[in-house]
Amino acid sequence: MPTIGYLSGAPRVSTRPTAESGGPRSHILGILAGFGALGWQMETFIVGDSLPPRLVAHSEQMMRANHFSALVADLSRLALRYLYRRAALKKLGQVDWVYERFATFQALGKAFQSLGTAWILETNGTYYAEAKSDRRTMVLSGIARKLELQAYRDCDVLICISNTLKDLVCREAGIPESKVIVVPNGVDSEFFSPDNQSPNRVFEGFTIGFVGRIVQWQGLDLLMRAVCQLKQEENMDINLVFVGEGLQRPPWEKLMHEFGLAANVRFLRQVPLDAVPSHIAGFDVGFEGKTLLRSGTMYHSPLKIYEYLAMGKPVIASAFEDSCRVIRDRETGFLFMPGDLRSLKQAIVEAFHSRDKLSAMGRVGRESVKTQHSWNSRVAQMVPEILRILEARSGIVPQETLDLAPATLTSHQKQF
């Protein structure tokens, strides 16, 4: 039975139910479950699981506090780079593959690769650019960029969450497209299921809801502006519920009052993962309004789209790559031009006047994610692609690994 070692060197990323970053937690658990469903033996080295939560709580705010705090954080992660490598080798020992979720200043899989183990590296963004420009939590961005791009060059297979990110990484790192696989996010449709859920409903009236990190590119300010104008122009009674924490929460709470929406908007705290489905069940539609990053691109694959749909909720979403691929406009959701106030207002109006159709739309959306976008299906489609790349690079793939690949070995051209 082949064994895969899962690696993550980010202190803030954890699989604990109370993890500060819920998206990475869901992604890690989904990938692990997908490999487990194929019969792989799983071993993990996840730094965030071994650190006391109090050491990483509010770390993003602390890194943004001043130049010195950010520098200390950068130097600490650099110093721990080699310590984590040795610790990972000691804990996991001999495995057939290592699958690493990239973290800034880290490349744990390099140590395993030097011993002949295949190193599969997954990236969810250009971390050096986001940390420097969007989060403003980094000082040593030049070193971070160099190490990140080198990791993309060195790994045996690189997993990107979108074609947009793949194109950007290939261009920045100068790597061939042939070593990159695009694997969007997925969902556990059994966990995120409307069955046996008691909706946690905040407002009785029509409610647009959001669950996730409250950061600049989520576009919640544009949503509040749109609702404010529709209230004034059309006398529309629309409510908003935002579940989560993040750097933009304080300024956006202030903006809520400036727009006169205090009676129509609730900012709820971050909740444990087990409580997320009931909150989504309390929405009429979900919101995913990402805007362009400061780099001028948007390459994310938003987990919340899949979670909303799995809960039977249509989605109002900005028309970037992933939402356009997953959402059928006016059938399972309502797409609008990213960052465009007029387009967003039109999508909200259509959703509001489709209230009697939302349940039926939600059922169609849930069926689509169950059959096409589960974590198990993501991994089942990914493994043959990995095997194909490894075989092309080395010409040799262990027989026990081939034996556990799904019957899709000859269908690696299937679309994710």
Image (cartoon, helix red, strand yellow):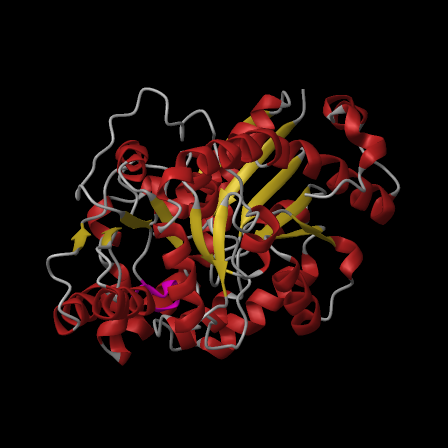
Q: Position of residue 4 (x, y in %)?
A: 61, 32
Please give left or right for residue 117 compared with residue 227 in the image. right
Q: Quadrant of the N terminus?
A: top right
- Residue 200's quadrant in the figure? top left
Identify the main secondary structure in magenta.
Answer: helix
Is residue 238 or residue 46 the one in the foreground?
238
- Residue 356's quadrant in the figure? top left
The residue at 49%/65% (across/down) is: 127
Q: Position of residue 155 (x, y in %)?
A: 68, 54
Q: Position of residue 349 (x, y in %)?
A: 37, 58
Question: Is 217 one of the magenta-colored residues?
Answer: yes
Q: Which residues are magenta?
A: 215-220
Please give left or right for residue 346 compared with residue 185 in the image. left
The residue at 39%/62% (across/down) is: 77
Is residue 141 or residue 219 the one in the foreground?
219
Please give left or right for residue 323 compared with residue 345 in the image. right
The residue at 28%/66% (across/down) is: 230
Q: Please tell me whether residue 315 is drawn above or below residue 65 in the rendered image.
A: above
How many marks can you see? 0
Is residue 144 or residue 24 the one in the foreground?
24
Q: Please tell me whether residue 311 is drawn above or below residue 293 in the rendered image.
A: above
Please give left or right for residue 1 compared with residue 139 in the image. right
Question: Is 49 one of the magenta-colored residues?
Answer: no
